[in-house]
Image: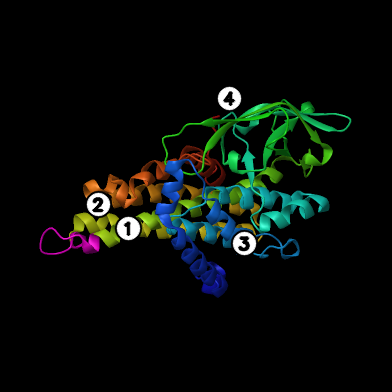
C-alpha cells in the first residue's frame, strides 16, 4: 500500500483544489463573515462565487455538471474555507447530505432536477431531522406523512434547523403514517420553503454567525408524489447515506476553524514582544499551540480516513471513522480556539482580532450535528461491543 492509498498524502488534484479554495476564502476572509453576521446578512457572495467556480459541486457526478469527486474533495473545500476564516456552514448540509442522498437514492427525474443546481450552488437545501421531543433519539420522530390521492400531506415539527432562510427547500426526515411505532423507518421529503402550511421561526442564538437556526412547523403541508426521495421502506441505510457525510463535513468545518485560530495565534506569538523575545518563545505560550497543532492534524487525518472509506463504499467502517473524526475535531477546535484566545490575552476577546466570535462557534462543534456523548455511545457499543444503557 502506498502512502497515497493509505490516505497520508492527498492527490495533487486535491492539493491544488485546497490551494485554490484557500485563496478564494482569503479574498473574503473572517472580517467579511463577521460583518455579515453582525449586520444580519448572509455570506451570499462567497457562496455564489464558490458555486460558479465549481467548488460546491465537486462531489456531484460529472453527468449532472459536478466535479465527479467524492466527499473527501468536498470536505477539503469546507476545511480550506474555514481555515481562511470564511467557513460556509450550509456546505455541511446542502451539497453533502442532500445532494448525496438524492444522487444515491433519487429517481432519474429527481437527479436531473436537483443535482445540476447543487453542482453550481444555485440550489440550497436545508436538512431537517431533529425534533423538540426526540433530540438524539431519532426513533421518537413524530413528523408524519399521510398518503393522499395526489401525493402526501406532512404534519409535525423540527427544531435547530440551519440556514432555512437561505434555502428554497428542506429535505425533511419523517415517517409514513403506517410506521408510527417501533423502529424508525425514515421517509425523506423535499419541502419547498414557500409551501402553504410551512412555517419557520428564527431561534435567537448567542453565536456570532451569518447562519441562523430555526424551528419548523408543518401544518398539513401538501406535497406531490415525487416529493418523496428514494423509497418509503428504505429503512435507515438511506438516512445514514447522508449522516456519514454530515459528520465528515462537520469535522472538516471544525478543523478549518481550528486552523484559522491557530494561524492567528502563531502570528501574534511571533510578533508580540513584551520582554526580550516574542511571547512565542515562552513554553507557556508555545506548548498549548503545539498541542493544538498536533490534535488538529490527528483530527484531519481521521477525517481523511472516514472520507476515503465512504468514497470506497464501505458505509459501516465509514460510520465508525466519521464519528471518531467528528469527536476528535470538536475537541481539537475547542482547545485550539481557547489557546489562541489565551495567547492574545485581553486582545483575544477584542472584536478587532476576530477570535471572540469563535468561542461559542467552536463550542457548538462538540454538540452538533451529533453530541460527543452520542459519539462515545456509538464507539462503546459498535467498536467495543459494550452493552447499551438505553
Discs 1, 2 touching: Cβ within 8 Å? yes
Discs 3, 2 touching: Cβ within 8 Å? no
Dot 4: element? loop
Q: Which residue is drawn at 45% across and 44% down?
A: 37
Residue 284 visible to the viewer: yes
- Residue position marked by numbered label 4 in the rendering: 133
Mark 1 or 4: in front is: 1
Instruction: Say whether residue 283 is left or right of residue 70.
Output: left
Task: Tell me where residue 275 sits by quadrant.
Answer: bottom left
Q: Residue at x 55, y 29 (%)?
A: 390
- Residue position marked by numbered label 2 in the rendering: 344
> Marks 3/2: CA distance?
37 Å
Mark 3 or 1: in front is: 3
Instruction: Say whether residue 143 is left or right of residue 19.
Output: right
Dot 3: element? helix
- Residue position marked by numbered label 1 in the rendering: 264
Amino acid at each position: 500500500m502506498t502512502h497515497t492509498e493509505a490516505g497520508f498524502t492527498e492527490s495533487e488534484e486535491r492539493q491544488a483544489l485546497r490551494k485554490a479554495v484557500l485563496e478564494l476564502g482569503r479574498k473574503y476572509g473572517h472580517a467579511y463573515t463577521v460583518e455579515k453576521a453582525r449586520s444580519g446578512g448572509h455570506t451570499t457572495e462567497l457562496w455564489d462565487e464558490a458555486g460558479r467556480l465549481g467548488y460546491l459541486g465537486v462531489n456531484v457526478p460529472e453527468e449532472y455538471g459536478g466535479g465527479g469527486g467524492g466527499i473527501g474533495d468536498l470536505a477539503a473545500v469546507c476545511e480550506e474555507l474555514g481555515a481562511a476564516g470564511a467557513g460556509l456552514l450550509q456546505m455541511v448540509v446542502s451539497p453533502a447530505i442532500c445532494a448525496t442522498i438524492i444522487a444515491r437514492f433519487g429517481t432519474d427525474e429527481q437527479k436531473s432536477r436537483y443535482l445540476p443546481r447543487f453542482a453550481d450552488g444555485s440550489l440550497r437545501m436545508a436538512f431537517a431531522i431533529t425534533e423538540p421531543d426526540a433530540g438524539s433519539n431519532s426513533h421518537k420522530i413524530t413528523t408524519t406523512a399521510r398518503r393522499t390521492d395526489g401525493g402526501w400531506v406532512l404534519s409535525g415539527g423540527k427544531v435547530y434547523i440551519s440556514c432555512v432562510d437561505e434555502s428554497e427547500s428542506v429535505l425533511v426526515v419523517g415517517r409514513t403514517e403506517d410506521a408510527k411505532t417501533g423502529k424508525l423507518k425514515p421517509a425523506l421529503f423535499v419541502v419547498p420553503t414557500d409551501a402553504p402550511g410551512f412555517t419557520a421561526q428564527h431561534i435567537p442564538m448567542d453565536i456570532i454567525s451569518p447562519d441562523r437556526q430555526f424551528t419548523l412547523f408543518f401544518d398539513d403541508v401538501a406535497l406531490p408524489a415525487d416529493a418523496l426521495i428514494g423509497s418509503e421502506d428504505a429503512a435507515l441505510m438511506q438516512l445514514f447515506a447522508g449522516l456519514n457525510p454530515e459528520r465528515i463535513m462537520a469535522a472538516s468545518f471544525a478543523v478549518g476553524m481550528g486552523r484559522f485560530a491557530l494561524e492567528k495565534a502563531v502570528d501574534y506569538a511571533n510578533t508580540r514582544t513584551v520582554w526580550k523575545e516574542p511571547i512565542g518563545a515562552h513554553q507557556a505560550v508555545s506548548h498549548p499551540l503545539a498541542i493544538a497543532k498536533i490534535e488538529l492534524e490527528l483530527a484531519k487525518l481521521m477525517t481523511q480516513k472516514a472520507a476515503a472509506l465512504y468514497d470506497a463504499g464501505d458505509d459501516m467502517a465509514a460510520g465508525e471513522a466519521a464519528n471518531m473524526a467528528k469527536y476528535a475535531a470538536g475537541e481539537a477546535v475547542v482547545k485550539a480556539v481557547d489557546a489562541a484566545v489565551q495567547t492574545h490575552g485581553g486582545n483575544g476577546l477584542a472584536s478587532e482580532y476576530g477570535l471572540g466570535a469563535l468561542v461559542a462557534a467552536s463550542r457548538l462543534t462538540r454538540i452538533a450535528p451529533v453530541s460527543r456523548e452520542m459519539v462515545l455511545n456509538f464507539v462503546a457499543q459498535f467498536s467495543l461491543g459494550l452493552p447499551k444503557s438505553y
